[in-house]
Image (spheres, rainbow, N blue to C red):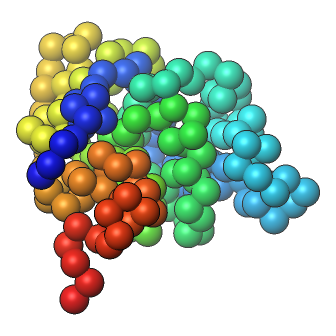
């Protein structure tokens, strides 16, 4: 797989807990994309503003979002996972994801992890450990680990590079070829 920064593929962070059906509008309202704010930096203070006010001021580099079912439902807005990543979120662990959000997150190098038990037991502030290589997520505070289906090596390479655009810039093409 080449040289991979282990900290990108194995990490720990503080949990931010959300429920089911968190839409892209909950993450960042469409009024900001289509309004007067034209940059991601300008949108950052509005991240989760209606469901977790002040999130952007409290989130730290390496934190993890933990949610229920259907995370990222609604409009296909790649700026939703981009803003989460920009805010320092390292991964999203949810029972399930909206398909387009899942793909956008991978394209941007933000791992979407499907897990069943961890979202059930996790409380805000719990420490979550993730190993993308092993396909394992643990809630350290609850002494509970859960395996998830590991990402293929090609996807791990994209995540390790910070997303598909960064991968192409650094390698001249995709890890799975063009045809």
Q: Is residue 89 above or below residue 82?
A: above
Residue 175 locus on image (x, y percent): 23, 67
Residue 148 locus on image (x, y percent): 14, 45
Residue at position x 26%, y 35% from top? 5
As drawn, the residue found furthest toward the top would be 141
In this rendering, the count of numbered labels is: 0
Which image quarter: residue 92?
top left
Left or right: 87 as drawn, with respect to 97 = right
Which image quarter: residue 54?
top right
Front one among 172 and 1: 172
Front one among 95 and 128: 128
Residue 11 locus on image (x, y percent): 28, 26
Residue 95 locus on image (x, y percent): 29, 47
As drawn, the residue found furthest toward the right would be 36
Residue at position x 70%, y 49% from top? 40
Residue at position x 64%, y 39% from top? 48
Classify the position of the C terminus by image quarter. Answer: bottom left
Q: Is residue 168 above or below residue 159?
A: below
Front one among 82 and 18: 82
Left or right: 69 as drawn, with respect to 42 = left
Q: Tell me, yes or no, if residue 83 can be seen here.
A: yes
Residue at position x 51%, y 32% from top? 88
């Amino acid at each position: 797989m080449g040289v991979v920064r282990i900290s990108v593929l194995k990490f720990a962070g503080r949990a931010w807990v959300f429920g089911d059906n968190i839409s892209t509008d909950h993450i960042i309202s469409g009024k900001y994309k289509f309004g007067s704010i034209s940059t991601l930096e300008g949108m950052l203070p509005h991240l989760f503003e209606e469901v977790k006010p002040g999130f952007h001021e409290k989130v730290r580099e390496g934190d993890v979002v933990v949610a229920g079912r259907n995370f990222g439902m609604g409009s296909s807005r790649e700026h939703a996972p981009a803003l989460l990543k920009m805010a320092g979120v390292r991964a999203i662990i949810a029972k399930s994801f909206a398909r387009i959000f899942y793909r956008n997150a991978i394209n941007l190098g933000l791992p979407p992890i499907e897990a069943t038990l961890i979202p059930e037991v996790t409380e805000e502030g719990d420490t979550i450990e993730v190993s993308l290589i092993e396909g394992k997520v643990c809630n350290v505070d609850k002494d509970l680990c859960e395996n998830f289906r590991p990402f293929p090596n090609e996807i791990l390479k994209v995540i390790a590079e910070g997303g598909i655009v960064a991968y192409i810039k650094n390698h001249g093409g995709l890890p799975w070829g063009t045809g």
